[in-house]
Image (tube, rainbow, N blue to C red):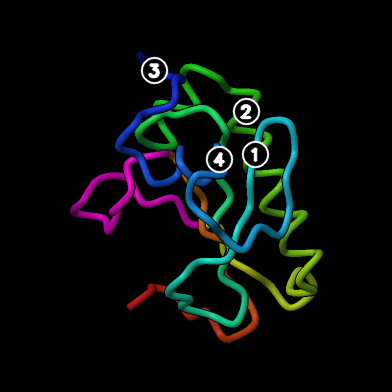
């Protein structure tokens, strides 16, 4: 059922504390933690505590929580002091776009040049 924790989901296991992560910020609706394979000096994932497979399904079902993810992404950027120099928020949707964990999540990237288009 959408929104419910999934037993086979890595990010649901991080939310529940069953899998360790380097958590940098938590709220009632989100968890932010460092990516284990960082692509920039700041690379933090911000996830909703509820399970939806991607950002679009989260936004349709629970728009306030989708907004919470975006707000917390900005908070993480400020906390890591990359907000003044610029940062990127990325939502990959589908395996063809590089999504490997099918639990909605935002990548917060900063601390180096982020030319467009990404490579």
Instruction: Count residues near mark 2 (Cα–Cα under 10 Å), then give few for <14, some for 14-19, many for 20+.
Output: some
Q: Is 119 in the magenta? A: no
Instruction: Where is residue 43? Give x, y as percent.
Output: 56, 70
Q: How many marks?
A: 4
As measured in the structure, the alpha-carbon distance from the residue carrying label 4 to the one carrying label 2 is 15 Å
Relative vertical location of residue 82 with respect to residue 94 in this rendering, above or below: below
Residue depicted at 75% across the width and 38% down the height? 27
Q: Which residues are magenta?
A: 90-103
Query: Which label's residue is closer to the chain start, 1 or 3?
Result: 3
Q: Which residue is mark 4?
A: 15
Q: Which mark is residue 30?
A: 1
Which residue bears the numbered disc 3? 2
Gap between marks 2 and 1 measured at Cα = 8 Å
Are the residues flagged by discs 2 and 1 in contact, CB closer than 8 Å? yes
Between the C-alphas of marks 2 and 3, the distance is: 14 Å
Looking at the image, do the residues carrying marks 1 and 3 touch, with CB atoms under 8 Å apart? Answer: no
Q: Residue furthest top?
A: 1
Which residue is at the front of the view, 116 or 54?
Answer: 54
Q: Which residue is mark 2?
A: 65
Q: Nearer the viewer, residue 85 or 44?
A: 44
User: Where is residue 74 shown, x and y percent of the image?
Assistant: 72, 54
Mark 3 vs mark 4, CA separation in Å: 16 Å
Q: Is residue 99 above or below residue 35?
A: above
């Amino acid at each position: 059922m959408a929104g419910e924790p999934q037993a086979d989901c890595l990010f649901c296991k991080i939310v529940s504390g069953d899998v360790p992560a380097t958590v940098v910020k938590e709220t009632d609706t989100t968890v932010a933690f460092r990516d284990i394979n960082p692509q920039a000096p700041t690379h933090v994932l911000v996830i909703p505590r509820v399970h939806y497979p991607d950002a679009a399904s989260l936004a349709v079902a629970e728009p306030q929580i989708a907004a919470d993810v975006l707000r917390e992404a900005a908070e993480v950027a400020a906390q890591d002091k990359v907000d003044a120099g610029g940062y990127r928020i990325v939502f990959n949707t589908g395996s063809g776009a590089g999504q490997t964990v099918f639990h909605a999540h935002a990548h917060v990237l900063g601390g180096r040049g982020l030319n467009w288009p990404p490579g």
